[in-house]
Image (spheres, rainbow, N blue to C red):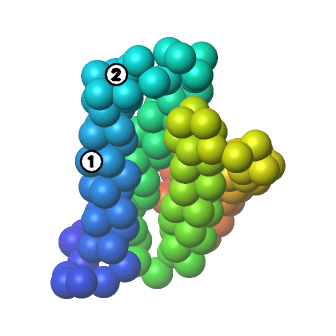
Amino acid sequence: MTVSDPGGRHSKMFSFASVLGLTGIGLGAFGAHFLKATLENHGSMETWSTAVEYQLLHAVAFLAVAVWAKTDPANPWLARISVAWILGTLLFSGSLYLLALGGPRILGPMTPLGGALLMLGWALLLVAVRSRGGAEPGQVI
């Protein structure tokens, strides 16, 4: 079933997933090439790579949720997952990017807060699958 929703919830989800993927690829390349010496001097190449990895992983996961939202627009859990993953990625990956570049250590607590929001999004995904608004057994989402 395809639902027309121009500019609606799933369109916004596709846009967010695209932005996360685009910036994740860009930041990965930027770190591997332009910032390589800086990151190596700070001993933070691994930190930068972790930020990129989590951002890209959640871009792909977010894309899957956007597809689900297109076929199940009444499912209220999908918007909650989206908020958790957007905020989680901004806090987790964003704080790691800044820390890798020598940002103030006060940013450190933002990383686990972002990680907790990413985990919350995954927990909400489980709830969405198990709820009445989720997919029926055997249904492809």
Q: For the point 45% across and 34% down, which residue is it?
A: 52
Residue 48 is left or right of residue 128, and the answer is left
Q: For the point 35% across and 38% down, which residue is it?
A: 27
| Mark 1, secondary structure of its residue | helix
Q: Give the spatial CA distance, label 2 vs label 1.
A: 16 Å
Of the residues tagged 2 and 1, which is closer to the observer?
A: 2
Where is the N terminus found, in terms of image quarters?
bottom left
Is 1 located above or below residue 60 in the figure? below
The amino acid type of the residue labelled 1 equals Leu
Residue 123 is left or right of residue 81, and the answer is right
Q: Are dots 2 and 1 in contact, CB under 8 Å?
A: no
Residue 133 is marked as none
Is 40 located above or below residue 127 in the figure? above
Residue 76 appears in the figure: yes
Q: Residues within 10 Å of mark 1 (few under 14, many from 20)?
A: some
Residue 125: give x, y in percent of width and height: 60, 55
Residue in the foreground of this view, choosing between 81 and 125? 81
Residue 12 is left or right of residue 51, and the answer is left
Is 7 located above or below residue 133 in the figure? below
Residue 121: give x, y in percent of width and height: 63, 56
Q: For the point 60% across and 17% down, which residue is it?
A: 43
Residue 141 appears in the figure: no
Q: For the point 63% across and 44% down, which residue is it?
A: 103
Residue 58: give x, y in percent of width and height: 47, 45
Residue in the foreground of this view, choosing between 28 and 67? 28
Residue in the foreground of this view, choosing between 96 and 81? 96
Residue under label 1, please give it: 22
The amino acid type of the residue labelled 2 equals Ala
Residue 14: give x, y in percent of width and height: 29, 63
Residue under label 2, please give it: 32
Mark with earlier residue (2, 1): 1
